[in-house]
Amino acid sequence: MKKNTPHANGEKAFKGIGVTRGIVIGEVALLERHRMALSQRRITAGQMHAELRRFEEAIEKSKAQLEEVKQRIVERGLAQHSYILDVHLKLMDDRMLRDETIKTITEQLVNTEWALKKTLEKIAEAFDAIEDEYFKGRKEDVKHVVDRILHNLVEGETSAIEEIEENMIVVAHDLSPADTIQLNLQRVIGFVTDIGGKTSHTAIVSRSLEIPAVVGLEDITAYVSGGETIIIDGTEGEVIVDPSPATIKLYHVKQQQYRYFERELLKYAPLRAETQDGYHLTVQANIELIDEIPSVIQYGAEGVGLYRTEYLYLNRKSLPDEEEHFAVYKRLAEEVAPYSATIRTLDLGGDKFASYIELAEEMNPAMGLRAIRFCLREPEVFKTQLRGILRASTYGKIKILLPMISGVEELREVKGILKDAKDELKGRKIAFDPEIPLGVMIEVPSAVVIADILAREADFFSIGTNDLIQYSLAIDRVNEHVSYLYEPLHPAIVRNIKRVVDTARAEGIEVGICGEMAADPLYTLIFLGLGLDVLSMHPIAVPGIKKVVRRCTRTEGEAVLKEVLQFTTAKDTELFIRQKMAERFPEDFAQSTE
């Protein structure tokens, strides 16, 4: 389906990115923002201080607004989302945001609005150079913060969210996380936006609120004026404006089917992920914030298979100290008990630390000084994180996971730094787990080739399929011109995964997958056939994977894998596996094979 497809019956269909599953039918509430016409205005040296004061006052007003929103959401019992507003509050004190704007005002003698606009362009350009989809999504946070400050500078309305009085579907160019958190679920049953992505904070909030949403529709606001009937299918990422009576009837049926499907699926959440022939597959959750742990428990995950630690380093003026690391990881260990939590060490590029670590500019940060390479380049920064993890290991089951390992020398160097961290804690008479497991993320092709060498020196493997697919097939999955080449079932990918799993089995170490493939039931039979120990995914995906595991056998998975390995193209492999899953789970897969 194209982005916008007009039909003969007058309805208009749009295809975007579904960020929260579910189907809703309602009336459009068009959220139109005050259109800010930002133009450059020259100021005199004598006006400069007044302009700087305007900038500071707008920031303070913006902070006060966010604090007020925080208070309101706490009163509504939504305190678990306040961390996102804290991120925005921190961004308002971001050194680059403030310093660049002040520099532009004072050196170029221009108005604050124009200077802030130029700063946003510079920051956005830096984010666009990052290949990782998750961190591209952080650009939206900066934009939302700047938009709020700009609205206060021009005295525009910052939100009309609370004026919506009926059960309606919000249509907007964009929604900030603050907007989304304020949605009154008694009145708003879904939302769609022109821009946005799956990894944005707005998407994270919508999933937590479980409000159907589709983003990235490009120009849907140009096709509505308010009051139209609209259908959202957040599962398929589809939106229909002015649907025909027949289409409305069809989606009412789909809506009932989906609600039944969700109720049935949730029954699997508390159940053990064990096949009918007794094979247990541990199903865990990927999270980035402690406040997501209630979802981990709700959807039945057996612990945390990937805890991302990057948030501790972003949007701040200084590096997190050992105490801050310890406090976060201690809480993680305690709240996921009796299950384990796997903490991935810092997986950022050195370009994120330019404000307090002097590093040369890189042409391609994704292939440069990032993840474990950066940590080995800055051992004291790395050691601080390791000490925090070690100290937390006495409060629960903690594992350490190393990202982007490409050679055994890196693993050995990490072991040396980890030993130093342990010795320092011993010297301070601080307890830790001396046998804390140390694992390797397999996400670089070289790591696949030398998996046997790594397996002899690592305690476990976690296959990061997102990056492994990108690096193995030499494609950028967020580049629309080549994203069609992002094929999880490419024979090279399936064989690479099998090679790693077989090697881990031979060396007697645990092996799992923590990429997006783990969350898709389409691949679960293949993973059963491979003999994986762990699958780790977004919490909401856990019940669906458990359903497949509990209704299949390991033997069945092995037979499917044998067939899959015979195919020479991703297309043939996908056709086969979809047909197989449609036979086994017609209620879930029959439609997708049409």
Image (spheres, rainbow, N blue to C red):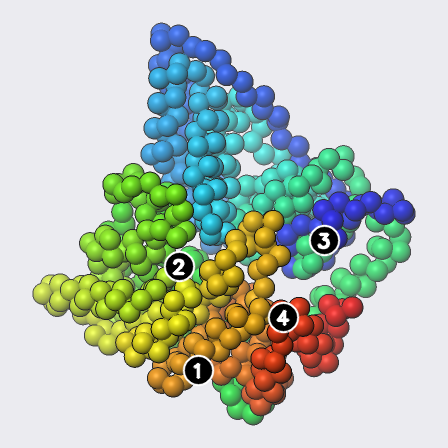
Tell me, yes or no, if residue 293 can be seen here: no
Q: Earlier in the sequence, mark 3 or mark 1?
A: 3
Q: Earlier in the sequence, mark 3 or mark 2?
A: 3
Q: Secondary structure at mark 1?
A: helix
**SS assignment at label 4:** loop
Front: mark 1 or 4: 4
Q: Which residue is mark 3?
A: 238
- Mark 2 or mark 4, earlier in chain: 2
Q: Which residue has dot 2 on it?
A: 308
Is 163 on the left-hand or right-hand side of 333?
A: right
Q: Which residue is mark 1?
A: 502
Residue 410 in the image: state x and y as whole percent: 27, 64
Q: Amino acid at mark 2?
A: Arg
Q: Which residue is mark 4?
A: 569
Residue occupying the point 48% across, 46% down: 136
* Residue 155 to residue 434: above or below: above
Image label count? 4
Q: Residues within 10 Å of mark 4 (few under 14, many from 20)?
A: some
- Percent position of residue 151, x then y: 53, 27
